[in-house]
Structures are given as structure tokens and as C-alpha cells.
Image: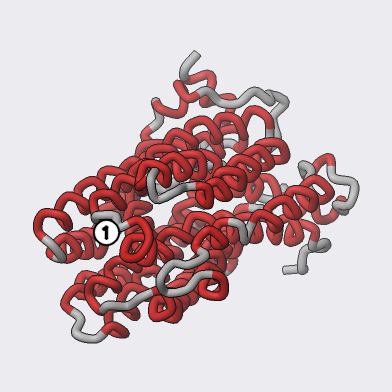
């Protein structure tokens, strides 16, 4: 096959990668810094910390509803900009919280952060659907999704430069990304436009982008939620997104688990957290590459997606044994392997939406699924905080058992509900509910 002409779509993807890295740096600060803030600054209980995370996840779930619909309505250029401005302002506001405000002050800041950050993935997935043919979407999704791990890696590398083990200077951690956020907005507005209207995109690359996508429709209206909520495909994707709760458990509770089980403090946590997210990064890229490789070798799209997701689930199961580990590094490697599996899974799961739904519905469906995932995460935090407060570390045993087994259940739902994952035509979708 002749190599496609033009590489401008990869420049767009680079911006998605950077935005996702900034997004995850901001949200992962508290997961890394949290044990220090609890032990030396705010003296939170496990339930206090759970309440902070519940607030973030409720806001994120609500934000996915609002941001997904907003992005489908106003487009990715404006919608993405609104999202990153909101999350940057509220990210910096964490530094204004005083000890007198307690966990409530952090919860307010996390609410605004979560609402704004909710726009990242709906906007990014919609952009991939606009700029990449189906055979490249999983790989492209895996590449930009790798930015989440880069952000999570940068947090433990940079924060110890500004904050000590007793928490002195903790406010500095929440200002680090603001410069990069506003620089990104400038680059986004200088670089992005829809492919069919982009002055720097060659006709050859545009033809390649559209080579295996649904034909464009003159109907530019967003697809209503009434239509989307009536589809079994929406609910199958939403159920599979409950696995987001597992990823959020690693992100926000992983440091707390390692602190409780092995006594690791701020600087002691840095290298283990970096290793976890380095492997997660590899999983994100490899998972997207694998299904794209299978498609290019002639495998049908739906079979390639399912094969990659099945391979991902097998990497995750051993994490069940993390609480029984006698050495910190054994637990770290089990979590790292599971994190890699999750990111490989996520790269393919997110790609199912543009595979099946029309472009005008992509951000909304991603928003609906993400809302379910973060609502599940909020409920999980409430349960975990309660069990840890009342019964101690046994809560982690239960949590890791669920984390290791949920993906197989989700894959069964995808297999039996979505079947061959046939694309839904936008006009047919409207006609079915008219």
C-alpha cells in the first residue's frame, strides 16, 4: 500500500497529547502529594480524602454531560479552549486553600477542576474522528492517551523540586502547569481547524483521512441525547467505562496504598509512581498499535478491537495479589502491569465510539460513558473511604480484587451487545426516532 501523503494530522495529534499530559499532571498532583498533605499539613482521615475525590468525580461526571454536549454543539476548537481555561483556573485555586478550610476547601477546588477537565477526552476523541481514518484511530488514540501517563510521570518528578517531605511549599505544585496551559491555547488556535477547511492540509491527505469514514452529511445538527440514550451501543460503551473507576483508584489511591503498606513518603513514592506510569504509557501506545496492526493485516475492525481488549485484560488480573506482596517493588510492578493493561484497553475502548457512532455524536457518547465511569469512581471512593476508616487496610484487598476482575465482565458485555460493531448512519439514527 502506498504511504499516505501529508503529515499534518500528526501535528494535530501532538496538541492532543500535550493537552492530555497537562490535564493529567493537574489531576494527579493530589494523588502523589496527598499522603504528605494528610500526614503533615491537613491531617485528613481516609474518609476526608475520599470526600475530596468524590467531589472531583461528581464534578467530572457532570462536566462530561455538559462538555460533551457543548463540544458537539460549538465544535472542538472553542469547546476544548473553554475546557482547559476552566480547569487551569481551578487547578491554581488549590493553592489558596488554608488549613482552617480543611478538606472542604480542597473539595471546592477539585469540583471546578473536575468540571473543566471533563472536556479533554470528548474533545480529543472527536478530533481523532475528524482527522484520522478508522485504520489509524486506535493508534492515534493510544498516542494521545499516552499523554495521560506523561502527565502522571511529570508530577512525581517535578513536585519534589518545590515541596519537601513535610509539605513545606506545597502550594507551588498547583502553579506549575498554568504557563503550559495558556501556551497550549495559543498553539491550538493557530493550528486547528476542521480538515475540509484547513488551509495547510493537502488534498491527498484529506482524501486519505476520509478514505474509510462515513460520508459527510449536510445535516450539521448535533445528535440529541434522546436518540443516543435509546441505543444499546451507548449503554454497552457506558458499562465498559466503569473500568475508569479502576484507573482512578490507581491514580488517586495508589500512593496512599504504598504509604500505608510500605511507609513510602513523598520522595520515596516518586520512582515507584514514575515506573507505574512509564509502563502505562507503553501499554497505551502498544494497545492502540496492536489493533491498528491487525486491521492493516486484513482483520475486520471489530475483531481487531476485541482481540486487543482481550490481550489487555490478561495483563490486569495479577493485580489482585498486590495487597499480599511482601516487598514494595512487587506491589509496584503488579500495579504497573495492570495500569499498562488498562491504558491498552482504554485506547481501544475509546475508539469504539467513532467506529460506531457518527461524528456529530462522538463527544456526547464519550461524555455519557465517562459520566458513568466517574460516577462509579465516586461510589467506589465512598465505599473505600468507609471501609478503610472502619476496618483498616482490608479495604485495599477488596479494591484490588475488583480491579483485577472487572475488565473480563466488561469485555463480555461488549462482545454480546455490540457484536460486529456496525456503524450507525446519522440520518438513519434520526429517522429511527422521528
Q: Which residue is at 38% across, 38% downward? A: 58
Q: Residue furthest right?
A: 199
**In terms of depth relative to the viewer, which is nearer, 318 or 221?**
318
Q: Is residue 231 depicted above or below 249 in this figure?
A: above
Colour theme: secondary structure
Q: Which residue is at 61% across, 44% downward? A: 89
Q: Is residue 274 depicted above or below 227 in this figure?
A: below
Q: Is residue 324 depicted above or below 371 in this figure?
A: below
**In terms of depth relative to the viewer, which is nearer, 163 or 231?**
163
Q: In the rendered image, which residue does mark 1 sit on?
A: 408
Q: Is residue 420 depicted above or below 307 in this figure?
A: above
- Is residue 304 in sight in this rendering? yes
- Is residue 136 in sight in this rendering? no
Image coordinates of residue 21 in percent, x first then y, are: 59, 61
Q: How many marks?
A: 1
Judge from the rendering whether residue 211 lies leftward or rightward of residue 203; answer left or right: left
Image coordinates of residue 82 in percent, x first then y, are: 65, 37
Mark 1 residue crowding within 10 angstroms, few (<14) / some (14–19) / many (20+): some
Look at the numbered disc 1 and give the secondary structure of its residue: helix
Which quadrant does the N terminus fall into? bottom right
Looking at the rendering, which quadrant does residue 221 occupy?
top right
Q: Residue furthest top?
A: 434
Judge from the rendering whether residue 219 lies leftward or rightward of residue 422; answer left or right: right
Image coordinates of residue 407 in percent, x first then y, are: 30, 58
Judge from the rendering whether residue 176 lies leftward or rightward of residue 271; answer left or right: right
Q: Residue furthest front?
A: 100
Q: Residue furthest left?
A: 391
Q: Which residue is at 30% across, 58% downward? A: 43
Image coordinates of residue 115 in percent, x first then y, are: 50, 39
Q: Which residue is at 61% across, 47% downward? A: 88
Judge from the rendering whether residue 68 lies leftward or rightward of residue 406; answer left or right: right
Amino acid at each position: 500500500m502506498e504511504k499516505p501523503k501529508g503529515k499534518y494530522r500528526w501535528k494535530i495529534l501532538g496538541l492532543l497529547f500535550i493537552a492530555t499530559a497537562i490535564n493529567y499532571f493537574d489531576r494527579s498532583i493530589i494523588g502523589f502529594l496527598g499522603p504528605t498533605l494528610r500526614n503533615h499539613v491537613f491531617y485528613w482521615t481516609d474518609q476526608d480524602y475520599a470526600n475530596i475525590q468524590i467531589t472531583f468525580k461528581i464534578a467530572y461526571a457532570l462536566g462530561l454531560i455538559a462538555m460533551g454536549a457543548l463540544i458537539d454543539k460549538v465544535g472542538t476548537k472553542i469547546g476544548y479552549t473553554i475546557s482547559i481555561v476552566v480547569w487551569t483556573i481551578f487547578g491554581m485555586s488549590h493553592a489558596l486553600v488554608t488549613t482552617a478550610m480543611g478538606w472542604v476547601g480542597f473539595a471546592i477546588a477539585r469540583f471546578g477542576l473536575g468540571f473543566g477537565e471533563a472536556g479533554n477526552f470528548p474533545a480529543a476523541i472527536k478530533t481523532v474522528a475528524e482527522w484520522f481514518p478508522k485504520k489509524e484511530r486506535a493508534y492515534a488514540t493510544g498516542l494521545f492517551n499516552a499523554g495521560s501517563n506523561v502527565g502522571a510521570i511529570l508530577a512525581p518528578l517535578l513536585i519534589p523540586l518545590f515541596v519537601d517531605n513535610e509539605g513545606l511549599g506545597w502550594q507551588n505544585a498547583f502553579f506549575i502547569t498554568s504557563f503550559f496551559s495558556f501556551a497550549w491555547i495559543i498553539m491550538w488556535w493557530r493550528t486547528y481547524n476542521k480538515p475540509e477547511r484547513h488551509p495547510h492540509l493537502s488534498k491527498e491527505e484529506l482524501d486519505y483521512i476520509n478514505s474509510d469514514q462515513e460520508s459527510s452529511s449536510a445535516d450539521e445538527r448535533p445528535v440529541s441525547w434522546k436518540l443516543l440514550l435509546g441505543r444499546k451501543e451507548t449503554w454497552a460503551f457506558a458499562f465498559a467505562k466503569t473500568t475508569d473507576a479502576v484507573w482512578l483508584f490507581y491514580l488517586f489511591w495508589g500512593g496512599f496504598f504504598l504509604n500505608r503498606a510500605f511507609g513510602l513518603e513523598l520522595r520515596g513514592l516518586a520512582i515507584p509512581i514514575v515506573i507505574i506510569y512509564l509502563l502505562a504509557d507503553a501499554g497505551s501506545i502498544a494497545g492502540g498499535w496492536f489493533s491498528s496492526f491487525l486491521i492493516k493485516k486484513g482483520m475486520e475492525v471489530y475483531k481487531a478491537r476485541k482481540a486487543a481488549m482481550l490481550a489487555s485484560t490478561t495483563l490486569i488480573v495479577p493485580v489482585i495479589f498486590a495487597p499480599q506482596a511482601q516487598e514494595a517493588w512487587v506491589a509496584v510492578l503488579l500495579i504497573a502491569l495492570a495500569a499498562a493493561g488498562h491504558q491498552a484497553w482504554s485506547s481501544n475502548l475509546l475508539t469504539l465510539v467513532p467506529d460506531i457512532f457518527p461524528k456529530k455524536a462522538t463527544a456526547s457518547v464519550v461524555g455519557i460513558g465517562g459520566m458513568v465511569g466517574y460516577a462509579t469512581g465516586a461510589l467506589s471512593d465512598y465505599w473505600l473511604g468507609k471501609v478503610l476508616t472502619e476496618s483498616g487496610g482490608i479495604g485495599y484487598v477488596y479494591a484490588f480484587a475488583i480491579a483485577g476482575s472487572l475488565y473480563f465482565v466488561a469485555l463480555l458485555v461488549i462482545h454480546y451487545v455490540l457484536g460486529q460493531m456496525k456503524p450507525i448512519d446519522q440520518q438513519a439514527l434520526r429517522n429511527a426516532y422521528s
